[in-house]
Image (cartoon, helix red, strand yellow):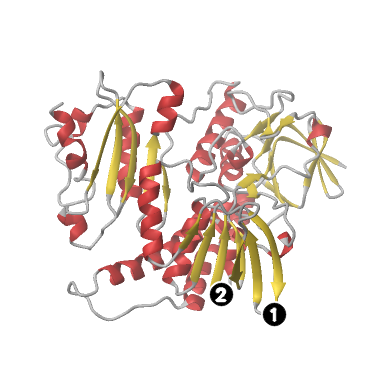
């Protein structure tokens, strides 16, 4: 028997869930499915558990930094207890989410979905048809094509380790590896990051990243550049990782190897060809309305949208765009011009707007203003040594084009710069004459970032 709906949503993360709920509120008949536990990456294998682990690492880092400055006595992470606390956040989510769907009148399914035609989806032995099909399947770790890849632990599984290994090698120099490495190091493990190229965290400003690498090495994290993974093999002592360029290979001993080398849209197995959904090497081809260029019944939201950014707030906004376009006939285009992002290390880094590389590539003239804020009492008072900023300014209009920060609470401060860029504010709009910022606070330190520019 074939069931008919207005919208079928594939994926129960933040993007898929928002599409389902908002379309249901508009009176549409909705079905949603997932082959994994309901909840998606952010809630179960990403942002939520990561923030819990990062919060514990931050406490240890703060106590360590203030030893001899009015604080004495060591603290340490009790890994099993921390994991139990983390799971108090994640374990209830699947049941709550399914119950909420059902209370809203959304039909819930479980299993792998595959296209059975332009407007049809098969889930197991059941067939569903719909006016619209929304793909919100998220992303998964990029396949590693090296001998011993089966010995590598997926980053998703790091959140559910019953015990923390003593020696961990992280493959890839992106935010996943850095965040996990900082947690592992503060929990007492020996952490190594292997980056295939000469630069880590490529989406962030290189000067800010250099300071984070220095801070990482100071807490014992071994950051290795130009170390592409060659193989992983099992030994009597654990795992042996081979990496490096030809003729310059090195080996690293580990108890666990964690995949942090990027994620790709999770769209294999959907049988997109059967649905007439075109793909390219990046994923599903969509137009500015997040609609398949080859099948107008299909929309894409979240990580499965290769043109977006793999961040939860972006997935939520994608979902809202898809809902608007389903309900109102492609009334809203997507744009990813202002997307703040942060890496939850110790200290964290954050970025929004143009980097110098991007500005040069686009031919946009700019002025750089950079500085160190470690001697500001807000930072010196907690012994934060790695605190700095880089601002990109339009020399004529004085508008802020980009902001790149490292230091305590920068994951919050960056949102001020995001608003400034979004609304075309100038450096003068951020001064004390314009806004009486709360004091003392890290946000108030914006005054010291822009003050010399006011006299330009």
The label on residue 121 is none
Q: Residues within 10 Å of mark 1 (few under 14, many from 20)?
A: few
Q: Position of residue 166 (x, y in %)?
A: 53, 76
Q: What residue is disc 2 on? A: 165
Q: Is residue 213 left or right of residue 420?
A: right
For image coordinates 30% across by 67% down, the residue present is 62
Q: Nearer the viewer, residue 421 or 86?
A: 421
Q: Nearer the viewer, residue 244 or 309?
A: 244
Q: Nearer the viewer, residue 130 or 450?
A: 450
| Secondary element type, mark 1 | loop
State how far apart marks 1 and 2 are (Cα).
15 Å
Front of the two marks 1 and 2? 1
For image coordinates 60% across by 21% down, the residue present is 329
Classify the position of the N terminus by image quarter.
top right
| Secondary element type, mark 2 | loop
Q: Are marks 1 and 2 in contact (CB under 8 Å)?
A: no
For image coordinates 38% across by 49% down, the residue present is 210
Q: Is residue 159 above or below residue 321?
A: below
Q: What residue is disc 1 on? A: 236
Q: Is residue 354 visible?
A: no
For image coordinates 73% across by 62% down, the residue present is 148
Q: Is residue 172 above or below residue 185?
A: above
Which is nearer the N-term, disc 1 or disc 2?
A: 2
Q: Residues within 10 Å of mark 2 (few under 14, many from 20)?
A: some
Q: Is residue 408 left or right of residue 216?
A: left
Q: Position of residue 128 (x, y in %)?
A: 80, 39
Q: Is residue 143 left or right of residue 49?
A: right
- Give the image quarter of residue 133: top right
Q: Position of residue 69 (x, y in %)?
A: 18, 72
- Give the image quarter of residue 345: bottom left
């Amino acid at each position: 028997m074939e069931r008919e709906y207005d919208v079928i949503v594939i994926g129960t993360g933040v993007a898929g869930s928002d599409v389902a709920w908002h379309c249901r509120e508009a009176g549409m008949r909705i079905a949603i499915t997932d082959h994994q536990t309901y909840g998606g990456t952010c809630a179960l294998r990403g942002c939520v558990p990561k923030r819990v682990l990062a919060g514990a690492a931050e406490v240890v880092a703060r106590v360590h930094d203030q030893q001899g400055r009015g604080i004495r006595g060591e603290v340490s992470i009790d890994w099993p207890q921390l994991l139990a606390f983390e799971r108090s956040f994640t374990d209830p989510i699947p049941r709550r989410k399914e119950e909420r769907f059902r209370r809203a009148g959304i039909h819930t399914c479980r299993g792998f979905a595959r296209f059975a035609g332009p407007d049809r989806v098969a889930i197991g032995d059941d067939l569903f048809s719909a006016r619209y099909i929304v793909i919100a399947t998220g992303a998964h770790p990029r396949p590693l094509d090296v001998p011993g890849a089966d010995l590598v632990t997926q980053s998703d599984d790091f959140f559910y380790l019953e015990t923390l290994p003593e020696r961990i090698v992280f493959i890839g120099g992106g935010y996943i590896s850095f965040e996990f490495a900082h947690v592992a190091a503060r929990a007492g493990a020996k952490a190594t990051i292997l980056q295939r190229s000469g630069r880590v965290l490529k989406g962030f400003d290189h000067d800010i990243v250099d300071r984070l690498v220095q801070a990482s090495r100071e807490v014992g994290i071994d950051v290795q550049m130009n170390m592409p993974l060659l193989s992983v093999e099992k030994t009597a002592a654990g795992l042996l990782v081979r990496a490096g360029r030809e003729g310059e290979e090195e080996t690293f001993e580990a108890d666990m190897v964690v995949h942090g080398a990027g994620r790709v849209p999770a769209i294999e197995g959907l049988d997109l060809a059967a649905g007439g959904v075109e793909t390219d090497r990046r994923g599903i081809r969509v137009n500015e309305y997040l609609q398949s260029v080859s099948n107008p019944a299909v929309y894409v939201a979240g990580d499965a949208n290769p043109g977006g950014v793999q961040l939860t707030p972006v997935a939520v906004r994608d979902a809202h765009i898809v809902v608007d376009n389903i309900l109102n006939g492609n009334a809203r285009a997507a744009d990813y011009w202002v997307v703040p992002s942060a890496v939850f290390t110790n200290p964290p880094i954050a970025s929004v707007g143009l980097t110098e590389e991007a500005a040069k590539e686009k031919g946009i003239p700019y002025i750089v203003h950079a500085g160190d804020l470690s001697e500001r009492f807000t930072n010196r008072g907690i012994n934060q040594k790695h605190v700095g900023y880089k601002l990109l300014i339009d020399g004529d209009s004085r508008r802020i084009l980009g902001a790149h920060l490292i230091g305590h609470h920068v994951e919050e401060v960056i949102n001020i710069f995001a608003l400034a860029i979004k609304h075309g504010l100038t450096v003068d709009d951020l001064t004390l004459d314009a806004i009486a910022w709360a004091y003392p606070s890290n946000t108030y330190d914006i005054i010291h970032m822009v003050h010399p520019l006011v006299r330009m």
